[in-house]
Amino acid sequence: MPSLALSMIVKNGEQDLPECLASVRGVVDEIVVADTGSTDSSAEIAREAGARVISIPWENDFAKARNLSLAEVTADWVIMLDADERLDPSAASLLPSHMANKEVAGYQVTIHNYLRTLTQTLWDRPAIPNDSSYAPARAYPAYTAHENVRLFRRDPEIYFVGRVHETTGPRILETGRKLGRATFLIHHFGMVVDDTSMAKKLLFYRQLGQQKVAEMPEDGQAHLELGIVELENLGNVNEALPYFQRACELKPEYGVAWFFRAKCHFRLGQFAEAARFLREAEGAGHKTAGVAELAGDTHYNLGDYEAACACYRRASKRSAASPGIESRLGLAEARTGKVQSGLRRIRRAIEAEPSNPDLYDRLVMIEVWLNHLSEAAAAAEKKLAAVIPRAEDFLRAASILAQMKDWQKTGEILQRGLDVFPASEALRANLGKLEALAARTCAAPGKK
C-alpha cells in the first residue's frame, strides 16, 4: 500500500498543534514540520508526536516555505494541513482507496471553515447551519465549505505555487495529470479566533496579496484574491474595485470575479452597474445563490420589486432553505402589494432563525412602511430580547415608540440602552431631549 506523509509549516501554533497532530495519528506514516521561527513550544510538541522538525527562514512566501517542508518528505503521497485544521476521522478508512487510484495525481478536499455566526460569509459562500457530527466542531453555529488540493502524489514536478493562497493544483494540471475529488473532510477552525488575532491575520494576508499581484501581474486569480481581502475583510470598496476589474479583464470567463465586481458597485450605490455585472457573472456560468440574491437586492433598490422577487426565488432554488433569502422575498413581495404573504414569509424566517438580527430589521421596515407602528415597535423590542443588540437597535425601537407618543416606554428603552452602552452619546442625547420635553409639558399652563 502507498505510504502517506503529513507536511506542515508552523509558527507559534502550540494551542492548536496537539489536536491537529492527534487527528492524523495512525493515519500517516511520516510527519514533516517546517518551523518558521516559533518562540513557543511548537517544535517540541511536533517532535513528541513523532515529527521530523526542520527550521526554515520565513520570507513572506507560503509556497516557498511549504516546498521546503515538502522536499523533506519520503512517502509516496502527501497530505497538507495547517495547525488550526483537523483531519476528519473518516479519512482513515477512505485514504487507501484514494491513493490506490493510479489515474489521479491529487485530490480536491472539501474543507469546512467554522464560523461564529450564521451571517458570516467566506468569499461568495454563505454560511451553512452546522450539523457536524465531529465533536470539536459542534460549538460553532455555522460553516462555509470550499475545496483545495490537500492530498497529492510526491513528485518533483508537483509543488506549491503562489506566495499566498498557495496550492499544488496548477502544477498537477500543467503537467497533464488528473485531479480527483476526495470523499473525506478537513475541519478548519482558523475563522473562530478572537477579533484581534483575525485583524492581524487579515492585514498580513493583504501584504502578501499585494506582493503576489506585483510578482504575477497577469494572474487574474491573484487580483481576485487581493480584491476579496480589501472588500470582504477590510471593507475597502474603492480599493477593491480595480482588482476585480483587472481580474475580469484577465479572465473574463471567471464568473466569481464579475460577482465581486458587481458587489462593489452595489455597495457604492451604483445599482444599474451592479445589475449589468451580475448578468456577466451568470453568463460566465457562476449561477450561484449568492449571485441571484445580490441581483434581488439590486432590483429591490432599483424599485423593480417583481424582478427582485424572481431573483430571490431563483436564489432559493439554488441553495438549501435560507431564512435570509426567505425574508428578502417577503420584503419584496410586500412591496408588490402581496402584504400578508410577505409578512408571513418574514415571520417564518424569524421563527427558523431567531438569532439573526437582519430578519427583525426587515419586519420592522415593512411594518413601519405599512404604518403599523404598534407591530413595528413589538418587532423592534423582540429583536432587543432575541439578539445581542447594538446601540442603534435601542434608538430604533425608541424612535418608533416616540412616533406613537408612548413617552414612558420611549424613556424606558433609551435608559435600557444607556445601561448597556453608557458611552453612547446618541442614546444620552435622545434621553435628554425626552426629559426636557416632559419637563416642559409638566410646566405648561393648565397642566398638573
Image (cartoon, rainbow, N blue to C red):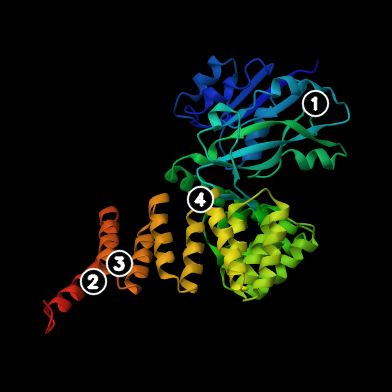
- Image-based side of 113 in relation to 423, left or right: right
Question: Residues under labels 1 and 4: Cα distance?
Answer: 37 Å
- Name the image quarter holding the C terminus: bottom left
Indicate the secondary structure of the residue bearing disc 1: helix
| Vertical comparison of 208 with 46: above or below | below
Mark before the other along the chain sequence, 3 or 4: 4
- Image-based side of 261 in relation to 53, left or right: right
- Name the image quarter holding the N terminus: top right
| Residue 242 visible in the shown view | no
| Residue 79 visible in the shown view | yes
Indicate the secondary structure of the residue bearing disc 4: helix
Q: Amino acid at mark 4?
A: Leu
| Vertical comparison of 95 with 232: above or below | above
Q: Can you identify the residue that label 4 sits on?
A: 203
Within 10 Å of disc 1 (Cα), the crowding (few <14, some 14-19, many 20+) is many
Q: Dividing the picture into quarters, in which one does residue 335 lie?
A: bottom right
Q: Can you identify the residue that label 2 sits on?
A: 434
Give 406 or 174, whichever is nearer the viewer: 406
Mark before the other along the chain sequence, 1 or 3: 1
From the top left corner, tell me how far across and down residue 347 is, in percent.
53, 57
Q: Amino acid at mark 1?
A: His
Q: Which mark is residue 426?
A: 3
Question: Residues under labels 1 and 3: Cα distance?
Answer: 60 Å
Q: Amino acid at mark 3?
A: Ala
Give 354 or 283, whichever is nearer the viewer: 354
Residue pictured at 59% horizontal, 59% vertical? 345
From the top left corner, tell me how far across and down residue 310 is, in percent.
71, 66
Indicate the secondary structure of the residue bearing disc 3: helix
